[in-house]
Amino acid sequence: MSTTAGATWPEYLAERARTARDPRLGRFLTAGTADPATPVAAVPLVALDLETTGLDPGRHGIVSIGLLPFTLDRIPLAARRHWVVRPRQPLTDSSVTFHGITHSAIAAAPDLDEVLDDVLAALAGRVAVVHYRTIERGFLDAAVRERTGEELRFPVIDTMELEARLHRASLGARLRRLVGQRPVSLQLGDARARYGLPTYQGHHAVMDALATAELLQAQVATHHGPATAVGDLWC
């Protein structure tokens, strides 16, 4: 799949690597990404989850980041990374209730700018796997733009999007709409339940990253197959 500018993701990242001013972004972009024709089973993956102060990247900020490298065969929990960061936007009562990260928890936390090099190094050379790319890619892009003046865009496999392809565009989904039934839920927990995956306590960045990694493994095993080209899955 192409980027919005019409280039493939490898082409886009290579061009951005030539023009990036921030050395941290330059290192991340230079690592590139897989050829779109590469079987997803051969692609290094990293599950990514963010907890935020709200849902609008333009008005809200990141409070925690969870990263978990994995493959279709194995999820090494020991390799997980987790950062609590201090947002430049204020916490809200609803966001504290949602993810449990309080004012005292972020008081001594670093700004994202202080850990950005580590975060990008953990993402570099891997295809990020998320559940709802508007949050993960949108918030990281907005935060990096605010701190560096440069955009941060990269390919992601969105497990919510994969579920939407199956359940929102199918004949069954159209029939449900015709008879007035509610559409199939695309929320992470509901999607996992359709594959018989266990229930985890949500809204912790590492646990949600783990849940997303397991969901992709189940989706590929059930609907796609390990030989599926990564370019057919990412966006």
Image (cartoon, rainbow, N blue to C red):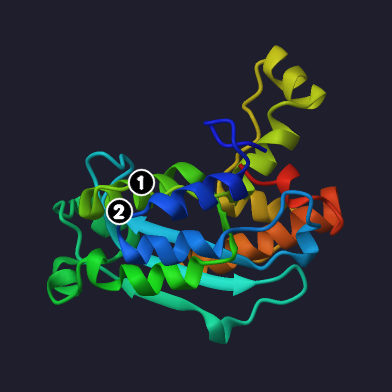
Are circles 1 and 2 on residues that touch, CB within 8 Å? yes
Quarter of image, res 100: bottom left
Instruction: Indicate which disc, 1 or 2, sits on the residue closer to the N terminus.
Output: 2
* Residue named by callout 1: 151
Question: With respect to residue 233, does 85 lie above or below?
Answer: below
Instruction: Tell me the quarter of the image containing the C terminus.
Output: top right
Question: With respect to residue 176, does 229 lie above or below?
Answer: below
Number of disc labels: 2
Quarter of image, res 204: bottom left
Q: In this view, does 92 lie to the left or right of 80?
A: left
Callout 1, which amino acid? Glu
Which of the two residues, 33 or 51, is positioned nearer the viewer here?
Answer: 33
* Residue named by callout 2: 144
Callout 2, which amino acid? Val
Residue 175 placement (x, y as % from top left): 77, 18
Q: Is residue 61 left or right of residue 99?
A: left
Looking at the image, which residue is at 81% across and 57% down? 39
Graded by Cα atoms within 10 Å as few (under 14), some (14 to 19) or many (20 or more), the crowding at tag 2 reads some
Looking at the image, which residue is at 22% across and 49% down? 146
Can residue 76 be seen here? yes
Instruction: Tell me the quarter of the image containing the N terminus.
Output: top right
Q: Is residue 108 left or right of residue 231?
A: left
Residue 167 placement (x, y as % from top left): 72, 34
Which of the two residues, 127 or 25, is positioned nearer the viewer here?
Answer: 25
Secondary structure type for disc 1: loop
Q: Is residue 12 left or right of residue 120?
A: right
Residue 85 placement (x, y as % from top left): 25, 68
Residue 13 placement (x, y as % from top left): 52, 51
Mark pair 1, 2: CA separation? 7 Å
